[in-house]
Amino acid sequence: MTFSDFAIVDYFELPPTQQTDIIHQLESKKDLWGALPFIINCLKKEGQPKVSPTDGGFHDLLGPGRFFLLLNTQNFKIAAFVSLARNDEVDIFVHGRENWTPWISCVFTYPEYRGHRLSQKMIHHAEKIAIKEFNAEYAYISTDHIGLYEKYGYEFFTKVHTVWGDETRVLRKKLQPSTQKASQL
């Protein structure tokens, strides 16, 4: 598989008509992953008033950040996505967590594109932006998976409760500005 027809774009930099198309694509595949309905809801509610601490737009809930899509430039179809934001489901406003930022989350590759290391490419892209835009020393991931993100250099950091009260594993990775390379597709 060649990826010359693919590009990483930020959802929030797309025109409204393309954002609507992206939401429709996500909705058509919402049964593939339990987190997709939440992601769709956050994108739909962007710019609307926050209803509760766990129900609002992407930036209301997560703070400054990006939602990167790997799109086929020929047909505008999603192959993978990842988010990078100041916060995630672990509340960084709890004392002692103020410096736990930025967070990489919502890492997903559509089944038909799996096996091509797209998650790794998307995570590396997010790390590069974390260094550039957040001046980040570390990137954090909240996950229940064991072994998935460790292969990308993330290490167990601690266990904490999410804003929903569930326990999660927090992983982190020391970012190396001098060794981070641009994502190559």
Image: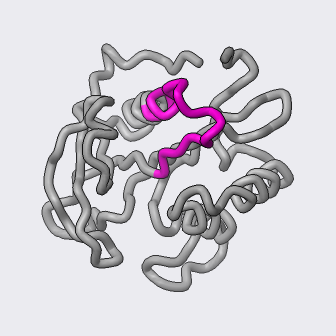
- Whole-percent x and y of residue 67? 57, 47
* Horizontal side, residue 42 vs residue 28: left or right: left
Q: Nearer the viewer, residue 77 or 97?
A: 77
Q: Horizontal placement of 16 versus 82: left or right? A: right
- Residue 140 lies, in percent from the top left, at 29, 46
Instruction: Indicate the quadrant containing the C terminus: top left, top right, bottom left or bottom right.
Output: top right
Q: Which residues are magenta?
A: 106-123
The answer to whether 78 appears left or right of 102 in the picture is right
Q: Compared with residue 51, is residue 174 higher up or lower down, i.e. above or below? A: above
- Asked if residue 8 lies in the magenta stretch, the reply is no
149 relative position to 83: left or right: left
Q: Please state which of residues 175 and 154 is positioned toward the viewer in this rendering.
A: 154
The number of discs equals: 0
Q: Residue at x 60, y 67 (%)?
A: 37
Residue 124 position (above or below residue 67): above
Residue visible at 34% across and 35% down?
A: 135
Residue farthest to the bottom?
51
